[in-house]
Image (cartoon, grey):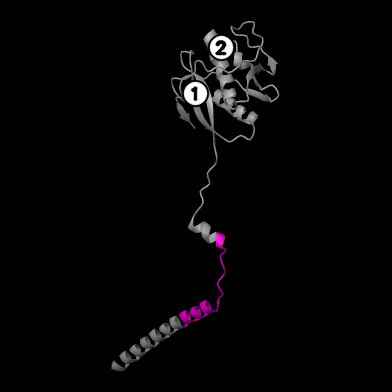
Amino acid sequence: MQSKLQTLLILLLGVGLAVCLGFLGYFYTRLQEAEMREDVPVPKEILEARATPQEETARMDLLQVYFPTREHNMLASVSIQSLPSDTLTQRIRSAMELLIRGPREENLLAPIPEGTKLQNVYWSESDGRVYVSFSPELLGEDRPMHGLAEWATIYSIVNTAAQQSSAVKDVQILVNGEIIDSGRLVWDWSMPFKPDKSFVQYPVGSQS
């Protein structure tokens, strides 16, 4: 019985020694490989970018747009963030799209009827005139066209367009690219309008 126990102990010791030697051999091999391996150089630009990550920020333009108050007797200027524009024509087009979208403030009204599309914007640098063409919904039959409502629409468009550059002297509003027939209207829309800020409120804030 005692001899069997001694044999078992010797066997266990042998197995344990073999396992230990195996681990030692494995780590020795890995150490040798690490010493022989050449380090791969990391470009300096990558290390710097990893250390100080760069945040991408898109530049935005701040456009001043005019919306009528609920009484239709005043205009309020609102500064709205927009994507940057390379030309005056693009800047005016962006401002007109913001007018069509309408204000977020509850005390202001959208000066352009829902469903109206901006068709084209043309800038005549020689005479300082902007031509802005809308779809027929601008003066739709179902829209109440009293004098104050017309005034609010006209000067929201004109003052907003003129605000984009001091070079703008007047604005011609068109429908389908044509002069507007003012037969059923209070104001004469066939002529270009000069900007008029006589009834403009102080800025009411900004929106994005």
Where is residue 96 shown, x and y percent of the image? 59, 25
Where is residue 91 shown, x and y percent of the image? 61, 30
Name the amino acid type tagged 2. Glu
- Residue at 35% across / 90% down in the picture? 10
Helix, strand or loop at label 1? It is strand
Labelled disc at residue 92: none
- Residue at 40% across / 86% down in the picture? 17
Q: Is residue 41 visible?
A: yes
Viewer-side residue, 51 vs 200? 200
Query: Which portion, as a residue range, is magenta?
Result: 25-45
Where is residue 116 shown, x and y percent of the image? 60, 20
In the rendered image, which quarter is residue 144 located in?
top right
- Residue at 50% across / 78% down in the picture? 30
Q: Nearer the viewer, mark 2 or mark 1?
A: 1
Q: Is residue 19 above or below residue 201?
A: below
Residue 99 magenta-highlighted: no
Q: Which residue is mark 1?
A: 77
Q: Which residue is mark 2?
A: 150
Name the amino acid type tagged 1. Ser
Contact flag, marks 2 and 1 (Cβ < 8 Å): no
Q: Is residue 107 above or below residue 61?
A: above
Q: Is residue 114 visible?
A: no
In this view, which residue lies farthest toward the left?
A: 2
Pick whichever of labels 2 and 1 is earlier in the sequence: 1
Residue 12 lies left or right of residue 170; in this view the side is left
